[in-house]
Image (cartoon, rainbow, N blue to C red):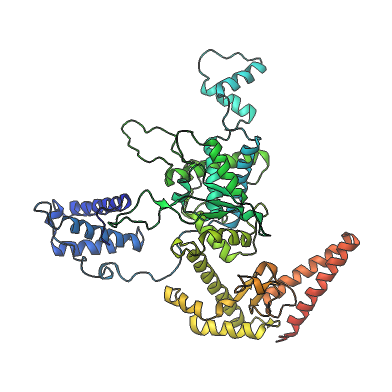
């Protein structure tokens, strides 16, 4: 459907495309866009295609928006009309080259250590605010400093506190800025975004009263008692095809767990009484500045998250608490971001991406606060059941496919490199890995290739880093699903509940090496443990020895 008006975002991109074109026109001795000939447009298209400072998709958008600009002006008289861009009725690849075919989610997930530390920080601040142990705001610096100087027997001159006096007081008292309302809101954004899978705009438009408490009437987890109602924005258009910038009420609530629910409780206590929004914009626009929105923008919340991390790390360093890493391989920042505290900005879309990635790739892993990814998956997924347009299940499935592809690639390389394989499922794993290598080795992960991979049945082979083995899953014989007859998730193994003796297990050399290390560590601890624990260590070590011996002897047992 053709829209009547472009969205604000489209208009902004169109402006940038026009500005880049006008800069090019200026450097080529032309006076206006009306002077461009078809040859000029062709030359400009080649100029855009040669750019190396932007992505392929951005170069495409440059051409698309100029084509739209021509279409909007096609009926205008000179000098407002101009010649149609030469790519308007042709393929962009003529100017830009073939499009990249790699099929992946470009949004970078947070490192597990970074997101865990950030969740701990956010949960600590929210809990402290709700139970009263964390005071939001502070007495004026001048009053506090004057009290300290008086206690030291120092008389300050009247008037404002000088910079020198302030620095003297801060250095002597190890002063740190207190947490404020912005800190609580940033912490709440982290918990709500991560534990619901909401998009940033959906979080920022939550309103007072959005949280629902539903008493559990079965043996279901108490963490599934909380639902959140709100608005959605993605892909919504009116009858004319124009984007619905105000969104629409989501017909299915999000389902979440207690940390996100407590974050909403904190926001409701903080919220101004004159607005229904939990993330209402609190500042007045500066003179000459126009701002019509009622809620915080996504760029501003990204900056607020950076400030929150900086403040948390300062307190954590002083108190001995874990810091959120902002440098090194586990950094919370993207690869191209500066770790300068004054410039920290966190990508708000990365929370949703991270949740999907870790659910797909670390189902047995622990996030933080004792919460398991597998548990979060079962809860959060309730809020997306039957919603193909939501996108979140697709993101999880894509990450699972990519992870399975990478696992099989690694297994193929290990077997080709001479690794032995043992265990009850050794033959099945070897056959599956061989089939994968024959059909997919070296192939680019296009959408079509991933669809073939999904249908191949090879995704039932899982490299279980938690249990240090390979699972060739067969639901009928799997020991990880003791209640699989009534389990809706029986199509995939429960990698967090892998059982020794399962007929679906196989070991490669690296698994053998890790089990040997575990066995030796258990035996080394026996002399220092009470008798019951020592007996338990010995029992596990004996079971590991059986697996180790079987691998050394090259037994398949299949």
Q: Is residue 367 above or below residue 489?
A: above
Q: In the drawing, does residue 236 fall left or right of residue 36?
A: right
Q: Residue furthest left?
A: 78
User: Residue at image x 63%, y 35%?
Assistant: 134
Q: Residue furthest front?
A: 217
Q: Looking at the picture, tell me which residue is in the foreground, 113 or 2.
A: 2
User: Residue at image x 76%, y 82%?
Assistant: 550
Q: Is residue 430 above or below residue 362?
A: below
Q: Please say whether residue 424 is visible from this viewpoint.
A: yes
Q: Looking at the picture, tell me which residue is in the foreground, 15 or 382.
A: 382
Residue 547 location, x and y as percent?
76, 78
Residue 258 location, x and y as percent?
62, 50
Residue 232 location, x and y as percent?
43, 53
Image quarter in which the C terminus is found: bottom right
Instruction: Indicate the quadrant where residue 449 lies.
Output: bottom left
Q: In the drawing, does residue 277 fall left or right of residue 289?
A: right
Q: Looking at the picture, tell me which residue is in the foreground, 289 or 316.
A: 289
Q: In the drawing, does residue 464 fall left or right of residue 20?
A: right
Image quarter in which the N terminus is found: bottom left
Residue 358 location, x and y as percent?
57, 61
Q: Looking at the picture, tell me which residue is in the foreground, 98 or 67.
A: 67
């Amino acid at each position: 459907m053709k829209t009547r008006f472009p969205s604000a975002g489209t208009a902004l991109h169109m402006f940038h495309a026009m500005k880049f074109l006008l800069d090019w026109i200026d450097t080529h001795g032309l006076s206006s866009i009306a002077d461009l000939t078809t040859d000029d447009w062709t030359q400009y298209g080649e100029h855009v295609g040669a750019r190396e400072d932007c992505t392929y998709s951005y170069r495409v958008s440059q051409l698309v928006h100029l084509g739209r600009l021509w279409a909007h002006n096609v009926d205008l008289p000179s000098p407002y009309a101009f010649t149609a861009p030469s790519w308007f009725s042709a393929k962009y690849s003529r100017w830009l080259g073939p499009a990249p075919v790699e099929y992946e989610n470009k949004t970078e997930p947070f490192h597990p250590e970074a997101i865990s530390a950030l969740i701990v920080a956010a949960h600590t601040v929210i809990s402290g605010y709700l139970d009263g142990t964390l005071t939001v705001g502070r007495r004026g610096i001048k009053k506090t400093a004057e009290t300290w100087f008086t206690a030291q027997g120092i008389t300050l001159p009247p008037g404002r506190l000088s910079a020198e006096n302030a620095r003297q007081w801060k250095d002597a008292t190890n002063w740190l800025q207190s947490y404020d309302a912005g800190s609580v809101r940033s912490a709440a954004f982290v918990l709500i975004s991560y534990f619901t899978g909401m998009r940033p705009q959906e979080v920022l438009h939550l309103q007072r009263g959005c949280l629902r408490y539903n008493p559990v009437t079965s043996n279901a987890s108490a963490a599934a008692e909380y639902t959140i109602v709100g608005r959605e924005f993605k892909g919504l258009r009116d009858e004319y095809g124009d984007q619905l910038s105000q969104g629409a009420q989501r017909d299915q609530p999000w389902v979440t767990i207690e940390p996100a629910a407590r974050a909403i409780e904190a926001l409701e206590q903080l919220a101004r009484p004159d607005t229904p929004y939990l993330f209402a914009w609190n500042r007045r626009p500066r003179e000459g500045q126009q701002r019509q929105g009622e809620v915080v923008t996504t760029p501003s919340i990204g900056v607020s998250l950076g400030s929150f991390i900086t403040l948390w790390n300062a307190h954590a360093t002083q108190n001995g608490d874990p810091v959120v890493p902002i440098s090194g391989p586990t950094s919370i920042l993207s690869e191209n971001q500066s770790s300068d505290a004054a410039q920290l900005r966190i990508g708000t879309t990365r929370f949703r991406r991270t949740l999907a990635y870790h659910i797909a790739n670390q189902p047995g892993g622990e996030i933080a606060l004792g919460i398991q990814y597998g548990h979060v998956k079962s809860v959060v997924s309730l809020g997306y059941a039957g919603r193909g347009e939501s996108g979140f299940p697709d993101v999880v499935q894509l990450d699972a496919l990519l992870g399975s592809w990478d696992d099989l690639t690694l297994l193929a390389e290990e077997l080709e490199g001479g690794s032995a394989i043992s265990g009850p499922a050794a033959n099945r794993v070897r056959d599956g890995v061989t089939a994968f290598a024959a059909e997919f080795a070296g192939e680019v992960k296009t959408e079509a290739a991933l669809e073939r991979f999904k249908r191949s049945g090879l995704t039932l082979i899982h490299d279980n880093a938690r249990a240090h083995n390979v699972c060739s899953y067969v639901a009928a014989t799997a020991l990880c699903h003791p209640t699989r007859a009534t389990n809706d998730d029986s199509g995939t193994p429960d990698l967090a509940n892998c059982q020794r003796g399962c007929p679906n297990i196989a070991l490669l050399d690296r698994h053998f090496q890790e089990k040997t290390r575990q066995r030796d560590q258990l035996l080394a601890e026996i002399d220092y443990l009470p008798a019951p624990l020592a007996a338990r260590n010995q029992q596990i070590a004996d079971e590991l020895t059986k697996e180790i011996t079987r691998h050394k002897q090259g037994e398949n047992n299949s």
